Each structure stands twice: as structure tokens, then as C-alpha cells.
Image (spheres, rainbow, N blue to C red):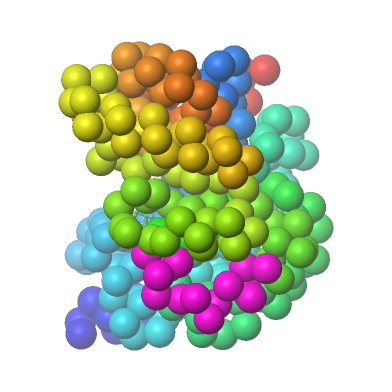
Amino acid sequence: LMLESALRNAEERGELSLHYQPQFDLTTGRLIGAEALVRWLHPELGSISPAQFIALAEESGQIVKLGEWVVRNTCRQIKQWLNQGLKLERVSVNVSALQIQRGNFADSVGQILRETGLAANFLELEVTESFIIEAEQSFAILDALRQMGVELAIDDFGTSYSSLKYLKRLPIQRLKIDRSFVQDIPNDLNSNAIARAVIAMARSLQLETVAEGIENSQQRDFLMAEGCQCGQGYFFGKPVPVVEFTQLYLAGL
Ligand code: G
Ligand code: G
Ligand code: MN
Ligand code: NA
């Protein structure tokens, strides 16, 4: 309860920030974009992990306001990077099921895009695989977002038992292969088989795949050979603050 009240209005007090983890085209090695990850630095408690406070924000309903802050700040940042000449295809933002179910999520994203003047295709929203199971009634909201031109990805793919029929019904462009499978490639044959199956299935549904948590070149090579288009992970780059991201990737032009 203490953390919950500490989180209230944390964005106004400047305690929230975004880190960005770069994403790369596995074949060309070119920077494609990034995933935005929220950070909370409390003046007394120090840094609190999103795993802790996102769940809290969901329980208390604060996720609607917090999530809007994340989308707005990410859109402003993409706009700024594009203006500076950074070549990005998109930046993705994690959104939780509750955030989509409550409030007017699609309207609020539309409003933010208008206000920032960002073309919708530069914004990607990641919904977790468990969303598919819990929130079938929210599929219409994803349709509305897709109609606006926003890109959609399923995060943590392979970790829940979502029905494959939903994958065809959802207006998504990408599947993110969960880090738990990637980490044991290429030595664990089960992980290899799962990654291979996800990539093949995605391809036949005309979806792209993004591998998460790539930590070495063997994992990158395996995934690339199987036809996975994009990847992120410590092998390429950690999530970093804006200034560092700009220095690292704008300098490389
Ligand atoms: O960066 P990492 O430990 O920091 O992220 C932990 C988890 O928090 C990840 O599963 C990530 O999806 C989630 N997360 C990070 N930022 C956000 C956000 O802005 N919104 C939501 N809903 N989840 C986030
Ligand atoms: O669930 P989500 O995929 O959004 O989580 C992102 C989380 O994964 C962040 O906490 C981020 O710091 C972490 N992460 C990103 N790349 C790597 C990696 O290569 N290895 C490990 N162990 N964690 C990573
Ligand atoms: Mn994610
Ligand atoms: Na993930």
C-alpha cells in the first residue's frame, strides 16, 4: 500500500523515465528501432523494478495514467529522433491488458499521435500473449488501433497457451519470441525446436518474428538461419537512457 501511494503522480514528480533497448535486423545488422521500458526512481526507496510496480499499477488502476505517460513520452521521443536524422522504423511500448480494457485506450493513443504529429506506423504496441486469453472482448480495441495504422506485436510468445485461432483473428504484425526460449539456444534441443516452430508458424501467417534476450552470436546465427527477422538482447545492446541511446546510434550514421 505504501508503494502504491508512492507511485501516485510519480510521473508529475519526474520520478519516471524511459529506457530504450535497441532492436536490429538480424541479417543486415541495421538498427530498426527500440523497445521502451519504464523506470521508476523513488527519491528515498531508490530504483523499483517494473516487475514490481507495473503489477501494483494494474491492481490500483494507476496503469491507465502511467501507460498514457509512457505512450506520450515514447511518441515525443520517436519524433525527436526522426528529426535528428536517426533512421528508425518503429519503437515499441508494452501495454497491459488492464490498460486496454479500462479507459478509452484507442482514443487516447489517437489523441497522443495527433498531439505529437507522429505517423502511427512508427509506434508499435506490445500486448502479452496472456492478453489474448484474458481479454477477448478487447479485440475490437486492437482493431481500432490497427485501423489508425499503429503496429501491433504479441510479447512473450510461447509462454502461455493461447489458441492459435486467435493469432489469425488479431490484426498483429509481429510475434516476439520469449527470452526463456532464446536463452537455451543452441544447446537445448527443445528450445531450438520451439523457436524454429514459432518462426515457421509466424512466416506462414505472414507475421514477422522478433527474438528477445539474444546474448551471443550463436543464438543470433541460429535465429537468423531459421528466418527470424529481428532481435534484441544484451548481445546487441542493453536498455539505456535516451542520451546514451542517441549517442550510441546517432553517432553511427
Ligand atoms: O526492463 P525490464 O526488467 O526492466 O522489464 C520488466 C518487465 O516490465 C517486462 O516484462 C516489461 O514488459 C515490463 N514493462 C516495462 N515497461 C513497461 C511499460 O511501460 N508498461 C507495461 N505494461 N509493462 C512494462
Ligand atoms: O517482458 P519484456 O520482454 O518486455 O522484458 C524486457 C526485459 O528483458 C527487461 O527487463 C530487459 O532489461 C530484459 N532483457 C533485455 N535483453 C536481455 C538479455 O539479453 N538478457 C536478459 N537476461 N534480459 C534481457
Ligand atoms: Mn516487451
Ligand atoms: Na518479453
Image side of residue 17 versus residue 83, left or right: left
Q: At which x and y percent is residue 224?
A: 47, 19
Identify the residue shown where x is 81% and y is 58%.
117
Q: Position of residue 246 (x, y in %)?
A: 57, 32
- Front residue of this view, candidates 26 and 42: 26
Is 3 positioned to the left or the right of 164 in the image? left
Residue at screen point 64% across, 75% down: 140
Give the overall secondary structure of the magenta segment: helix
- Name the quarter where the C terminus is drawn: top right
Q: Is 65 on the left-hand or right-hand side of 56?
A: right
Residue 165 in sight from this viewpoint: yes
Residue nearest the observer in this picture, 164 or 3 = 164
**90 relative position to 110: left or right:** left
Residue range highlighted in magenta: 130-143
User: Residue 206 location, x and y as percent?
Assistant: 63, 40
> Which quarter of the image is occupied by the N terminus?
bottom left
Image quadrant where residue 217 sits = top left
The residue that appears at 59% across and 44% down in the rendered structure is 205
**Is residue 249 visible to us here?**
no
16 is higher (above) or lower (below) than 136 = above
Q: How many marks?
A: 0
- 8 versus 248 height, above or below: below
User: Horizontal and vertical percent for residue 220?
Assistant: 40, 20
Task: Reply yes or no: does residue 202 show up in magenta.
Answer: no
Where 95 falls versus 238 (above or below)?
below
The quarter of the picture where residue 182 lies is top left
